[in-house]
Amino acid sequence: MAMQGKSERFAVIALQHLDAAYNLARWLTRNDADAADVVQESCLRALTYVDSYRGENGRAWLLTIVRNTCYRWLERNRPSAITPLSPEVEAEATAAAAGTAGDASSPESIVARQCDAALLNGLIAELPLLFREVLVLREIEELSYRDIGAVLGVPIGTVMSRLARARGALKEAWLRRTMRGPSDGL
Amino acid sequence: MDCKDLQELLHRYVDGELAPDLRAEADTHLETCADCRRLVAEETAWQQAIHRAGPYYAAPDEVRRRIARLAGRPAFARPLWRGWAMAAALLLAVALSSGVTAYIVTGSGQEPLTQEIVTSHVRSLMADHLTDVASSDQHTVKPWFHGWLDYAPPVADTSDAGFPLIGGRLDYIDHRPVAALVYRRNQHPINLFVFPSDEADGAIRASVRNGYNIVHWTAHGMTSWAVSDVNAAELLAFAQLLQRQG
């Protein structure tokens, strides 16, 4: 009987949020076959740990497992994908984030230029993992700061600063590609 | 609130993450400040562009089917389980009435673990995820676990005795990652879960759960659980073989 309840609770959470799970895995692994493996492994873990689910946001709970499984998977299969941010990237993103509000020229031109979705999509995919995950959770998955914090296992203050830097890094990459031309930078 | 305050709160404002009082203050400022209104409009447009640009990767049908199967667990023969529970209850009733209780409740304290072992076994067969590392070579399988586990599971070569090694898999038992070694007897897969335990060394204990045979023993601080649908005698022979090799 207990097993049945466990399986049912797992079914409710996992099947309801399976698209979210796959979306995150796909963005983090950047590959369909890998995402399918990670989601499957995540769901096995979710089934095992479903007793630890205490009725909080089911999507955030499942995404936490997916995110952790992604990292373990990447460590095993793509160790280069999870190298820490280089000081240059870090500094650039921080500067870009700080400049966001003050530099009126960049956002305006972004809006004026009718963003090229494919380019933007590619630039998100190229962001360092640390930035990509927070951006995907916020802009694509539209999670609240609180839920993002739960998934990443960091306080809300960290979510905000990391999100600002991720957005800064993306803008910087976008400007580099569109304003200065593809031959420059990147 | 001035322009500088608003710029600092820009993301939180656009993300709808400001507390109501701060939001009201920001709105008041925005009513009178065209520069900040433009800033908010630009940031909103930028975020919408990202939202539109980033594809939402929905789970493919194949993934959905696999997970549904995992959740629905059709191979979990519920009637069998019920039948077993009923038989156990009946047996217990008989035992109680005859005053013989000591030997009926086998493996006391191990019941949840036994169930978990069987569930893992079933899951490994259902989810097409029998092995993470597929190899009949113990020297390939054993090192694979390095880095995944804080212990080195013994991996025996029992192919000569008719129990070829198929591979290994990382599994989760008792809230911890454990080594699952996969062997085969004819066409029957055998899952062998091996993990450290403070249980005292002991003889092989056999049980049946949901129609699966299970054997369990502890030696040198390592507990082994083998589970399979092979018959009880063969599984016992497998366990004895491993115990001798261990």
Image: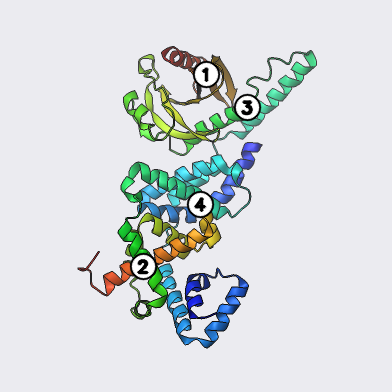
Q: N-terminal of the two: label 1 or label 3?
A: 3
Q: Quote the CA–CA distance across marks 1 and 4.
A: 37 Å
Between B198 and A92, which is closer to the camera in this rendering? A92
- Report whether mark 1 lies on the same chain as mark 4: no
Q: Quote the CA–CA distance across marks 1 and 2.
A: 59 Å
**Residue linked to disc 3:** B111
- Identify the image quadrant of residue A181: bottom left
Given this view, does label 1 or label 3 mark the residue nearer the observer? Answer: 1
Q: Quote the CA–CA distance across marks 2 and 4.
A: 25 Å
**Residue linked to disc 2:** A95
Seen in the picture, residue B198 relative to A20 is either above or below; the reply is above
Given this view, does label 3 or label 4 mark the residue nearer the observer? Answer: 4
Disc 3: which chain?
A: B
Which residue is located at x 52 percent, y 73 percent?
B13
**Residue linked to disc 1:** B218
Q: Looking at the figure, which quarter contains the C terminus of chain B?
A: top left
- Report whether mark 1 lies on the same chain as mark 2: no
What's the residue type where badge 1 is placed? Thr
Given this view, does label 2 or label 4 mark the residue nearer the observer? Answer: 2
Image check: B18 left or right of B8?
right
Q: Looking at the figure, which quarter contains the N terminus of chain B?
A: bottom right
Which residue is located at x 62 percent, y 73 percent?
B20
**Residue linked to disc 4:** A153
Q: Quote the CA–CA distance across marks 2 and 3.
A: 58 Å
